[in-house]
Image (tube, rainbow, N blue to C red):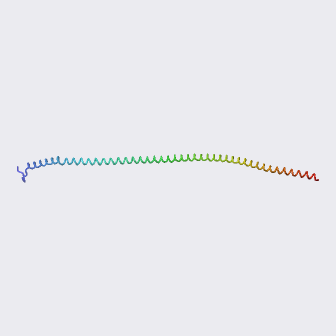
């Protein structure tokens, strides 16, 4: 065969066949394992990224849940504080009322005791005054009676002397 420019088709086909074998060998030995490795690595990192994103979302959900719980806990704490304040106020008012009642009772007892003491003192004072008055009257009567008797006797005796002398 006469081929222009000395091109041998058999030689070209052999080169193409060698190239195909080389390409297939390189594809099977280098490209495919490297591509599979890169795909696996890409999948691994995408999976890690996806897990990280899911973890972030879970963390965000937990944070929101905690915020809700904390808000509920804060409300509950405020309610308990308010109830405690009300209870304390009620107990304080109750204690004030009890204290007021006790004070009134003590004051009433003190007034009763003071009134009894006053009556007792007045009674004793009246007795002492009566005794002093009796003693004073006795002294007064005793000295006055003696003087009156002496005066009477003196006066009576003078009258007799006057009648005798007249």
Image location (x, y in percent) of residue 160: 91, 51
Image location (x, y in percent) of residue 93: 55, 47
In depth, the one of 107 and 127 nearer the eye is 127
* Outermost residue, right side: 166
Q: How many marks?
A: 0
Image location (x, y in percent) of residue 104: 61, 47
Image location (x, y in percent) of residue 117: 67, 47
Residue 54 lies left or right of residue 95; in this view the side is left
In depth, the one of 14 and 31 nearer the eye is 31
Residue 138 lies left or right of residue 65; in this view the side is right
Residue 26 lies left or right of residue 100; in this view the side is left
């Amino acid at each position: 065969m006469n081929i222009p420019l000395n091109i041998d088709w058999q030689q070209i086909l052999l080169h193409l066949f060698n190239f195909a074998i080389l390409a297939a060998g390189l594809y099977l030995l280098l490209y495919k394992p490297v591509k599979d490795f890169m795909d696996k690595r890409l999948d691994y990192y995408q999976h890690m990224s996806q897990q990280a994103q899911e973890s972030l979302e879970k963390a965000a959900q937990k944070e929101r849940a905690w915020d809700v719980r904390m808000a509920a806990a804060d409300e509950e704490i405020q309610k308990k504080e308010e109830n405690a304040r009300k209870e304390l106020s009620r107990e304080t008012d109750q204690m004030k009322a009890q204290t007021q009642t006790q004070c009134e009772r003590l004051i009433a007892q003190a007034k009763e005791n003071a009134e009894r003491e006053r009556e007792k003192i007045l009674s004793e004072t009246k007795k002492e005054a009566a005794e002093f008055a009796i003693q004073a009257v006795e002294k007064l009567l005793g000295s006055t009676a003696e003087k009156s008797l002496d005066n009477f006797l003196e006066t009576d005796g003078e009258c007799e002397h006057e009648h005798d002398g007249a």
